[in-house]
Image (spheres, coloured by chain):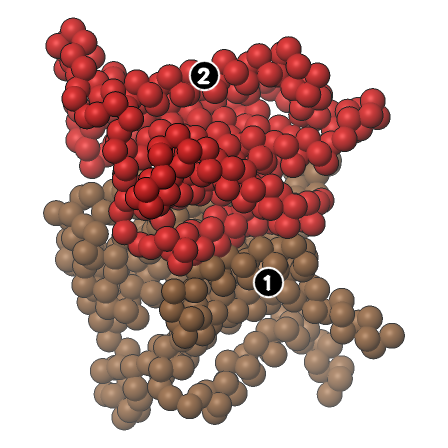
Amino acid sequence: MTEMLQFFMSGITVGAIYALVALGFTIIYNSSGVVNFAQGEFVMLGGMTTSFLVHAGNPVPLSILAAIVITIIVGILLNKLAIEPAKGASVVSLIIITIGASIFLRGAAQIIFDKQIHRFDSFNGDIPINIAGATILPQSLWVLFGAASIFSGLYLFFNRTMMGKAVLATANNRMAAKLVGINTNWIMTFSFGLAAAIGATAGALVTPITLTSYDIGVMLALKGFAAAMLGGIGNPIGALVGGLLIGLIEASTAGYISSNYKDASSFIVILLVLFVRPQGLFGFKTVERV
Amino acid sequence: MKRALQFLSPILPAGLVVLAVIILIMPFFFPSGFYFRIGALIFINAFAVVGLVILIGYAGQISLGHAGFLGIGAYSVALAPVYIGLPPSLSLFFGAGLTGIIAWIIGRPILKLKGHYLAVATLGFGILVFLFLSNEDQITGGPDGITVAALGIKPALAAMGIKAKTSVIWYFFTGFILLIGAWTAINLRNSPTGRALRSLHDSEIAAKTIGVDVARYKLIAFTISAVYASIAGSMLALMNKFVTPDVAGFIYSIELITMTVLGGATSVLGGILGAAVLTILPQALTFFHDYEHLVLGLIMMLIMIFMRDGLLPSLMAQIRRKAK
């Protein structure tokens, strides 16, 4: 029982990060129809920039803020320089563009920063907190708190503000949104900035636990993409559930079976789920009009 | 003469003749033996890309895990001689058959998916193959890789009195196999199967309406392209006499897709051009050392933004415009 609780704790921490990456995928997909494989690089940029600024002697909150701002700029540039000019390209071309962007950002990080592994100190030390015999790091609580605030903040944003509703309208029907006077290009830029900010926050929160280096983005993007698809792409709730599920599956596979196969387990589950529900757990069946 | 050529063209397309001539002439410009190896690498990648042209360009499907099939082909020639006692040449066919069966079985449920769901399912399959190859180190040698027995062309040629360097032999051998693969794919394009595939590329529903068994033809395209990938993987392992799980890695899958789309996904020769460009590029970029990733990512983005139809179709359109 204690063992199970322990796996649950570690699973839910990693799962929260996957959920945030999946949320980034969802936001960009909804506003532009693009699956952004550079989402993992946003997480990397957030973590790397924060740890470099902290080691340069800046206070942690300021460093995180600066890292988020820098990553937002990168996200907006990505949209303006690579995605907007490619408007109307096929799905495969767009996938290659964002993968190209992720390789580019990785290459840039390896030059601007370095190829070493980095971290900075946890916000509240590293003394584990005991809960019913299982332990959890204070930083994990920060990760969970951060993910919960982002998800609930976005829920309010999408349901209570004009701007949020404009984003939802664009996701539902781009043409109709344009017709009622929504500037869909601006919505797209905003979405890239928002997804970048979420990624950078996730990176800054988790770096004290998982450490960071220039090449962590690939696996994060794959897991985040898988989580988004598991939930059903385009659905923020699906991203949350998909991310947490993948985190929990991985932690229990690592605990009960073998840590060698923790990455495999999540992909096996995704394949099985898609075979039964081709539209993901929370996705709707779309009907194609001819 | 012209008539004779026209008579031959359905059997021997002009593009294929050009390709054969290029393969034969290029060695005269090679400054060193190293270039034969690069040439063979291009032909092997191009062979896998020809399979992807059938899947992406003809049938309009996508696979982000095709390196998984290369991995199965590569490890077949590494392991079948040890565990089943097959000679390396036969284990290439064994790998191709095994890959065909696996692709046929997993293709059924996977190909029901569309768009990004298909992308994530194929991606998952590729990663599973990669993880199996790296984790089952008692069989596969793990991440460090495993040695592969030689194919034995060189001694066979030597017995016939032909002496040639290994790299030169592989250049012409892989070039020859590529020509066969490209010829098959080009002929497939205008066969009834090829037409059915292209019809479901344009509109699945329209294809279904005129009586094309959509699920079956998708599965055919997927299986054929998987077998192409497997043979490419086998050749790669046999040439290097060594193989690591990276042959099945996600990055390699993406490189293959990029080669396919870069050259122009609907054209077999375009795909081969794409393979040539992306195989030579990293070799050329080694001069840039640390900037390699930066430049590679930049080139991928630029070509996809500015030459959307791919290199070959864009270039052909340019030439045609100039000619007018």
Q: Please, what secondary structure does the residue beneath circle 1 have?
A: helix
For image coordinates 39% across by 81% down, the residue present is B36
Residue A41 visible in the displayed image: yes
For image coordinates 57% across by 25% down, the residue present is A234
> How far is the residue under mark 1 from the one under mark 2?
46 Å
Of badges 1 and 2, the one in the foreground is: 2
Residue at the spot of label 2: A149
Q: Which mark is residue B263?
A: 1
**Which amino acid type corresponds to the residue marked 1 in the rendered image?**
Gly
Q: Please determine whether, in this image, residue A14 is positioned above or below residue B186.
A: above
Q: Which of the 4 image quadrants contains residue A108?
A: bottom left
Q: Please determine whether, in this image, residue A184 is positioned above or below residue B323.
A: above
Q: Please, what secondary structure does the residue beneath circle 2 have?
A: helix
Q: Which of the 4 image quadrants contains residue A27?
A: top right
For image coordinates 20% across by 43% down, the residue present is B135
In the shown orientation, is residue B68 left or right of residue B242? right
**Horizontal and vertical percent position of residue A242:** 42, 22
**Which amino acid type corresponds to the residue marked 2 in the rendered image?**
Ser
**Horizontal and vertical percent position of residue A6:** 19, 16
Chain in red colour: A
Q: Colour of chain B?
A: brown
Looking at the figure, which quarter contains the N terminus of chain B?
A: bottom right
